Image (spheres, grey):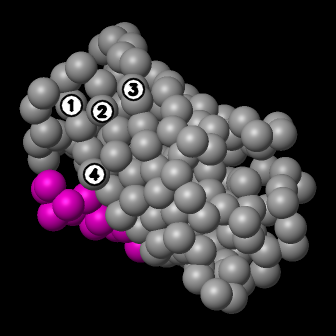
Amino acid sequence: MKLFGSSPFAQAMKAAGVGAALMMSVSAGHAQSGSPFAGFNGAWSGTGTVALSDGTVERIRCKADYKVDGTGLGLRQTLRCASDSYKFDLTSDVTSNGDRLSGNWSEASRNINGSLQGTAGGGQIQVFVEANGFAANLTLRTTGNKQTVQINSKGEIRGVNITMVRS
């Protein structure tokens, strides 16, 4: 299994993975209480797909760990995802101020980092992720214990769909 390189695809996958994990964490907490991260500590896992501009679609497996701070308004997250041909290891720190979200993330194996901003409300999360010339829109919907994330970009990576549940 090879690690992502420094191509636009590699950057896109890293940003998309971070955004997905962050959105999942925000949505689950938001659905459980008034604080967007409340009750979300712990391990989560799931699967999904990634679609590339050349039409290729691959299955992806993910594991995440979330630590909510004492105020319920801060979250530290790690996300590890892999398919048959790649893997990535992401860490992020996110804060909530009302319905506004902001944060930073990094991908350890390639020393890449970026930022995210978005909103939470009405059972839906929308986040804009940026890194090294890459941008993506992410939307999350939560139904019960199931979290579905959709990521869209106009770059080499066209879409990511991930579903995770508490492990």
Residue 119: tell me if it is visible: no
Q: Estimate the x, y position of residue 5 in percent, counting from the top left.
A: 11, 42
Query: Main structural element of the magenta stretch: helix, strand or loop?
Result: strand
Residue shown at 68%/88% (left/top)?
Answer: 71
| Picture quarter with the N terminus | top left
Start and end of the magenta stretch? 104-114
Label 2 sits on residue: 82
**In which image quadrant can residue 13 be found?**
top left
User: Mark 1: which secondary structure?
Assistant: loop
Relative depth, front residue between 7 and 162? 162
Instruction: Look at the numbered discs 1 and 2 and tell me whether their residues touch, using CB distance below 8 Å.
Output: yes
Labels 3 and 1 touching (C-beta < 8 A)? no
Whichever of callouts 3 and 1 sits on the residue coming sooner in the sequence is 3
Q: For the residues labelled 2 and 3, say whether their Cβ atoms are less than 8 Å apart.
A: yes
* Quadrant of the rendered image containing residue 18: bottom left
Q: Is residue 106 magenta?
A: yes
Residue plotted at (13% across, 47% down): 6
Q: Which residue is mark 3?
A: 60
